[in-house]
């Protein structure tokens, strides 16, 4: 089992920055990829960014050049640095992890960007 706890969400103005954090605990040795997804009201959950155990990264087209995913292995934490935020980035952001067999999810953190 893997437990994920997100933090760092909030209410900001368009053009601002936020950094989300996701702390992992439990069977973290089994994790081979982690990432962030988001879900806006009335929309499906979508992948925002992901990072593998070999530090390969992947981003949604809508956030490329603005968001950066990174990790600190010593702290078992994954970060999502979000710059130049737009109102359309407003959503609940969920951290997720995969060990190849199961997907684990955090409880989500709200990000609201006002225009």
Image: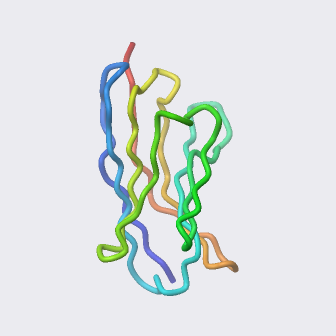
**Which of the two residues, 33 or 13, is positioned nearer the viewer here?**
33
**Above or below, 17 relative to 33:** above
* 72 relative to 82, above or below: below
Horizontal side of residue 59 vs 81, given as left or right = right
Q: Position of residue 75 (x, y in %)?
A: 29, 73
Q: Quadrant of residue 62?
A: top right
Quarter of image, res 14: top left
Q: Residue at x 38, y 44 (%)?
A: 81
- Front residue of 13/40: it is 13
Where's residue 76, x and y in %?
36, 74
Residue lying at 32% horizontally and 38% vertically, measured from the top left: 18
Please indicate whether residue 76 sits to the left or right of residue 51 in the image. Answer: left
For the image, the number of numbered tags is: 0
**Residue 54 vs residue 95, the one in the foreground:** 54
Q: Nearer the viewer, residue 104 or 53?
A: 53
Q: Quadrant of the C terminus?
A: top left
Q: Residue at x 44, y 57 (%)?
A: 107
Residue shown at 49% from the left, 30% from the top:
89
């Amino acid at each position: 089992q893997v437990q994920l706890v997100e933090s760092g969400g909030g209410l900001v103005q368009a053009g601002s920055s936020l950094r989300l954090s996701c702390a992992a605990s439990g069977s973290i040795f089994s994790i081979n990829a982690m990432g962030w997804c988001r879900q806006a009201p009335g929309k499906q959950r979508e992948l925002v960014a992901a990072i593998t155990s070999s530090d390969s990264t992947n981003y949604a087209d809508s956030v490329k050049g603005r968001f950066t995913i990174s990790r600190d292995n010593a702290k078992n934490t994954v970060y999502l640095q979000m710059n130049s935020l737009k109102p359309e980035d407003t959503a609940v952001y969920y951290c997720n992890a995969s060990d190849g067999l199961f997907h684990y999810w955090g409880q989500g953190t709200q990000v609201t960007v006002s225009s």
